[in-house]
Image (cartoon, rainbow, N blue to C red):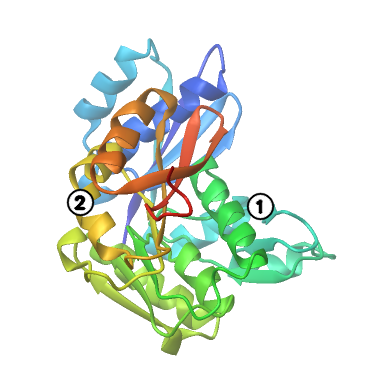
Amino acid sequence: MDHIAVSINIEPYKEETEGILTAELAEIGYNGFLTEPPVLKAYVTAEDFNESHLRLLLETYGIAVYSKEFVPEKNWNTDWESRFDPVTVNAGKGCNIRSPGRDSMIAVWPETKWRLVIQPESSFGTGHHPTTYMMLETLLELEESGSIKNTHVLDLGCGTGVLAILAAKMGAAVPVHALDTDRRAVHSCRENARRNRIPHKIIVKHGDASLVQRNRYGLILANIHKNILADEMDTLSGGLKPEGGHLLLSGFYTDDIPELTGAANRNGLVLLERKEKEEWVLLHLAKKTTTNYQ
């Protein structure tokens, strides 16, 4: 699929501005991001590109300087791979994420317990973004505590499938379920499962939270927009096993915490942990039990 690559000059450059702008661009269809300060490079399919919407958005941040280039379908993955630096989360016992074409470019890979090959294509989820990084980090912590093996896992809004793939490699119950409302993401997740030699361990479906099975999952991963999380909190809570089900939420900012923790509490969930990275937040929630709720 053909893409438009938009290079946006953020002056003065601030990580907070970049993070907010990335989220705003994602809302209007942009689904790939690379940062080389002060430039943010954002990708959108050619059919979804609307320059009027882009200009209006950039004007709200006082940004007037940007450029755009057409990226033919055959060059999309090449462009990503040339710029997609590998991501290492918790060296040693952690995980390393790389694109398929980077093996020949890097002589020595960091020593990690888990290695993932992820082709981003046009889907979100490489580990570069703070929300994905925190989700991966927390998955590693859960695996270290023995909470992943043989656990039924759902990745809601799977994107590239990086979270579902890591959970499957860790020994989660087969099959791991993955859902996304974007058919391109469904295709991307399936292809990445194949690249990591575990296509039989993941079932990927096109759909939203209405497909969440009740009382099934020991762990639900949802790195998606705050409004969806708030609106679907009852569905997410209902999808967890009554005893010991865990829910990892990300994709929102510190200002959104009260709304989401309030919704979680009303739906029988208790907050176990909160993480923050570059203004982004992860909430680790669990079903209320006699041991985790006083």
Amino acid type at circle 2 is: Asp
Q: Nearer the viewer, residue 41 or 189?
A: 189
Q: Residues within 10 Å of mark 1 (few under 14, many from 20)?
A: some
Nearest to viewer (mark 2 / mark 1): 2
Quadrant including the N terminus:
bottom left
Q: Residue furthest bottom?
A: 200
Compared with 227, 257 (above or below) is: above
Which labelled disc corresponds to residue 161? Answer: none
- Tell me the SS state at disc 2: helix
Compared with 76, 225 (above or below) is: above
Residue occupied by mark 1: 85
Asked if one can make out residue 287 in the rendered structure from this viewpoint, the answer is: yes
Report which quarter residue 15 is drawn in: top right
Image location of residue 209, percent across then percent down:
20, 59
Amino acid type at circle 1 is: Asp
Compared with 173, 256 (above or below) is: above
Image location of residue 82, percent across then percent down:
61, 55
Q: Residues within 10 Å of mark 2 (few under 14, many from 20)?
A: some
Q: How far is disc 2 from disc 1 in space, using C-alphas?
A: 38 Å
Residue at horizontal 55 percent and vertical 77 percent from the top: 149
Image location of residue 124, percent across then percent down:
41, 53
Asked if one can make out residue 9 in the rendered structure from this viewpoint, the answer is: no
Residue at horizontal 68 percent and vertical 62 percent from the top: 96
Q: Left or right: where does residue 116 sit relative to residue 236?
A: right
Earlier in the chain: of badge 2 and badge 1, it is: 1
Residue occupied by mark 2: 234
Report which quarter residue 63 is drawn in: top left
Quadrant including the C terminus:
top left
